[in-house]
Image (cartoon, helix red, strand yellow):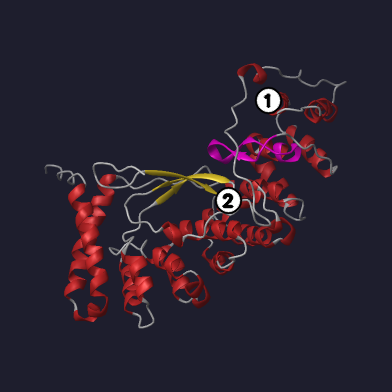
């Protein structure tokens, strides 16, 4: 790990189950052992580490389009040529080339024609396995799909979002497989601008996560589907995530649950922290992890400040919990990854300094408050860290002239 002149650790690469991710560690002191570790591939139900990145389709492949179908060449018959080509694709390169040709052909159809072609194939129950991984690219669309069915669902999401969402709901009515459900959930969520599908999306994502067959051997799509809970800010799913995090026999599921809970805390801190404060089983199983979530609170915000104050002063708080909290506070670390729906932007240096200056003043006042006498050593640690950060960062920009 390297450090910048401002004293913050920079980028750490890690594997999230089988989903590649980057942690941007905004400050030192992260206790990595508090986070349930990803599966190491040795236990039942764990998944292999990701392979090397798959290159994008070549320009040459993208230009090999089938002719626009005419009266004697209906779309469903034109699709069969591409199905046959993909069935014979023995290498990743051949599969990518055939997929590029399939996409070009679908785009050549008259408006609205791709949806019934894709629906017809999916309703037939047929599929073709491809020598490719489930890999997400920009915008939440797939760079490479593992099967033809997943490829067609993904392509429809690009070509006709409304039709893709309607087809997605049909897919979600039957447990086909986790990869298909992940893409279907994405397609329904993408057009849900008013949030009217939020409860539906949460329920279906929980159904996916709880599916015993899929959970026994989670695919890449299965693990990526957790992002739907983050996208919908499904704080009601905290109990399910808590169950997974406590699964010490399944490190892959525990890690996926932890990452999702962590990202939910960043988006809805008050709701999640209130639930964590009442979650006795999780506190007993993962006390340090829970403490690290409380260290994400922004003490400038009154509701978050009161939650942390109550948590710190609770008589049942242990020295270990307090140490884990103070050792990472303020926790502004971020996980940067390519997701089905969400994106993550780390706070800027200016934003971090503004935060640190205000919070340093607040915690310094707590140091002088007799009510905090029992936790004073931990407040000292927090103040020391904040002073280090404010001293090491660039000064705030001057206020604009009136």
Picture coordinates of residue 59, whole percent (x, y): 61, 18
Picture coordinates of residue 126, whole percent (x, y): 84, 40
Against 224, residue 273 (above or below) is: below
Q: Quadrant of residue 78?
A: top right
Label number found at residue 270: none
Residue placed furthest toward the right: 72
4 magenta-colored? no
Q: Quadrant of residue 143?
A: top right
- Identity of the residue drawn at 53% across and 53% down: 231
- Identity of the residue drawn at 31% across and 79% down: 313
Looking at the picture, tell me which residue is in the foreground, 70 or 249: 249
Picture coordinates of residue 341, whole percent (x, y): 54, 46
Looking at the picture, tell me which residue is in the foreground, 63 or 177: 177
Picture coordinates of residue 226, whole percent (x, y): 58, 54
Dot 1 falls on a residue whose secondary structure is: helix
On the rendered image, what quadrant is the N terminus found in?
Answer: top left
What are the residue bounds of the magenta stretch?
132-151
Crowding at dot 1, Cα within 10 Å, few <14 / some 14-19 / many 20+, comes out as some
Against 279, residue 39 (above or below) is: above
User: Would you say 232 lies left or right of 288 here?
Assistant: right
User: Would you say 83 lies left or right of 102 here?
Assistant: right
- Identity of the residue drawn at 43% across and 57% down: 32
- The residue where tag 2 is placed is 17
Numbered-mark total: 2
- The residue where tag 1 is placed is 93
């Amino acid at each position: 790990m390297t450090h910048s002149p401002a004293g913050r650790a920079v980028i750490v690469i890690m594997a999230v189950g089988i989903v590649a991710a980057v942690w941007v560690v905004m400050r030192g002191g992260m206790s990595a052992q508090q986070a349930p570790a990803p599966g190491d591939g040795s236990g039942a139900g764990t998944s292999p580490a990701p392979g090397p990145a798959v290159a994008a389709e070549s320009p040459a492949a993208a230009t090999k389009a089938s002719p626009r179908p005419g009266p004697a060449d209906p779309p469903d018959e034109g699709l069969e040529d591409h199905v046959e080509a993909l069935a014979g694709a023995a290498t990743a390169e051949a599969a990518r080339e055939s997929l590029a040709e399939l996409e070009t052909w679908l785009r050549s159809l008259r408006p609205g024609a791709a949806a019934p072609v894709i629906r017809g194939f999916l309703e037939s129950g047929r599929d073709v396995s491809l020598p490719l991984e489930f890999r997400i690219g920009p915008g939440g669309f797939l760079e490479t799909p593992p099967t033809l069915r997943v490829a067609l669902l993904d392509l429809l999401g690009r070509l006709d979002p409304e039709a893709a969402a309607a087809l997605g709901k049909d897919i979600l009515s039957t447990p086909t497989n986790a990869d298909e459900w992940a893409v279907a959930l994405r397609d329904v969520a993408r057009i849900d601008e008013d949030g009217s599908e939020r409860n539906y999306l949460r329920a279906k994502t929980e159904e996916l996560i709880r599916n015993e067959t899929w959970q026994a051997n989670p695919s890449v799509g299965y693990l990526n589907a957790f992002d739907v809970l983050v996208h919908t800010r499904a704080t009601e799913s905290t109990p399910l995530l808590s169950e997974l995090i406590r699964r010490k026999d399944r490190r892959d599921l525990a890690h996926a649950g932890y990452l999702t809970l962590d990202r939910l805390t960043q988006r809805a801190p008050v709701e999640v922290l209130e639930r964590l404060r009442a979650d006795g089983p999780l506190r007993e199983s993962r006390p340090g992890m829970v403490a690290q979530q409380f260290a994400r609170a922004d003490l400038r915000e009154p509701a978050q400040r009161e939650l942390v104050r109550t948590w710190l002063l609770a008589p049942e708080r242990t020295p270990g919990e307090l140490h884990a909290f103070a050792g990472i506070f303020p926790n502004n670390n971020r996980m940067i990854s390519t997701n089905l729906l969400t994106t993550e932007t780390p706070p800027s240096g200016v934003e971090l300094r503004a935060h640190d200056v205000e919070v340093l003043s607040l915690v310094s006042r707590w140091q002088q408050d007799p009510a905090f006498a029992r936790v004073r050593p931990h407040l000292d640690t927090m103040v020391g860290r904040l002073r280090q950060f404010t001293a090491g960062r660039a000064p705030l920009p001057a206020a604009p002239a009136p």
